[in-house]
Amino acid sequence: MEAIFAPSESTTFAQEVYLLVSQDNDKQTIKIKEASDELVKLLGRMRHEMEGYDLQEFLGNKTAEAVNECMEYSDFSADLDEVLSKCLNFKLKHFNGEELPFAMRIYRDQSRDKNQWFRILLKDERRIIQDSSLMRLLAQNMDGIKRMDEQTGIPDRYSAIEYLKLLQRYVQSHELKVVFAVIRMDRYAKSIAKYGKGPCIELLKHMVNCCLSKFRDGDVVLRLNDYSIGVLLFDITPETARIVLTRLRWHIASHHINFGGKSDFSVTISLCFTPLIKDDTRDVLEVCEYKIHELPEDERNAMIELGA
């Protein structure tokens, strides 16, 4: 298990399950500063029963022993992130005494005082099994309705429409988190007038390749038309999606290519995104495309976020 990481556009836990802790070397303590609502529910506790208390009180016995044995609370010794990275089986104690296994990732957080702070991201391993089975079933169902676009090598508009119908049913019946985005090539009319349709398809392919390089394997990029693509981001919150898509905009804008006789040609994109939610009566593809079409032709690098 990889336990030390920096969050990026390709990493997210869907349920916002975390502990925020502070390592005080002078007092030789690790205190819980914040526990997420989802975590305290999983542990059958209240927030005030955890926040302000030693982390070790809530760790499984072996995990607590490892922390107590390895922590030296010195500037020259291993900190909590290094110690927990060596724990192969991370467990937390339920209120009833049961030890619950979690997948764990830890990274340094911004310090609020003179101490070192760490954010521990967690996911219930029982939920991981459920999520894995759900995603396998979903992938099989999506493969059954997929149609590929020959020019770009990604699923086509028909697939996008059918995928969204399928996903909205899954969101309705399961706790599936999905964000959908429509991404347009800025100033397409001017580009096609100057370079022609064939070359502009190459610009669309460039957008597709940038998306495929930045997103996770399970995410889906779809061709909607000659100037826009759709994106399905799975197991992600709208807040994280905003960060991911912002980075994508700047990544594409700063990626220079050989095009139209220029060695430093760059494309900008504008996009509209929204989460899929339960009891949603919207046609999210239609809604996002409408918002994109409302943007002026000369508008560049815009981002529209639609609420749930």
Image (spheres, rainbow, N blue to C red):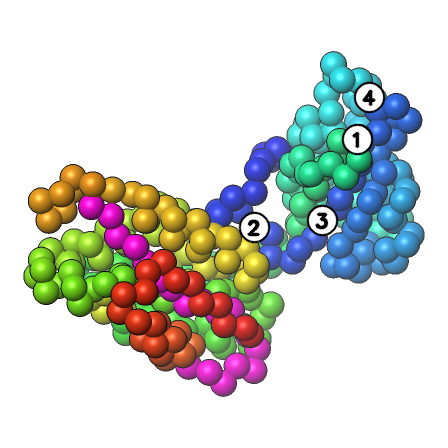
In the picture of the structure, the residue carrying the numbered disc 3 is 18
Amino acid type, callout 4: Tyr
Identify the image quadrant of the N terminus: top right
Q: With respect to residue 86, does 51 lie above or below?
A: below
Residue 218, horizontal then vertical, whole percent: 43, 54
> Who's the residue at 46% across and 83% down the image?
282
> Who's the residue at 70% across and 53% down the image?
17
In the picture of the structure, the residue carrying the numbered disc 1 is 115
Res 143 quadrant in image: bottom left
Amino acid type, callout 2: Thr
The residue closer to the viewer here, 146 or 39, is 39
User: Would residue 133 be visible to someone looking at this image?
Assistant: no
The residue closer to the viewer here, 207 or 1, is 207
**Label 3 element class:** strand
> Who's the residue at 91% across and 26% down the image?
27
CA distance for labels 3 and 4 = 23 Å
Instruction: Give the mark nearer the N terminus: 1 vs 4.
Output: 4
CA distance for labels 1 and 2 = 26 Å
In the picture of the structure, the residue carrying the numbered disc 4 is 73
Q: With respect to residue 241, does 166 lie above or below?
A: below
In the picture of the structure, the residue carrying the numbered disc 2 is 12
Residue 115, horizontal then vertical, whole percent: 79, 31
165 sits to left or right of 29? left
Q: Residues within 10 Å of mark 1 (few under 14, many from 20)?
A: some
Please state the extent of the stretch shown in magenta in the rendering.
265-283
* Mark closer to the observer (1, 2): 1
Amino acid type, callout 1: Asn
CA distance for labels 2 and 3 = 12 Å
The residue closer to the viewer here, 195 or 175, is 195
* Mark closer to the observer (1, 3): 1
- Let me know if residue 276 is in the magenta part: yes
User: Would residue 200 be visible to someone looking at this image?
Assistant: yes
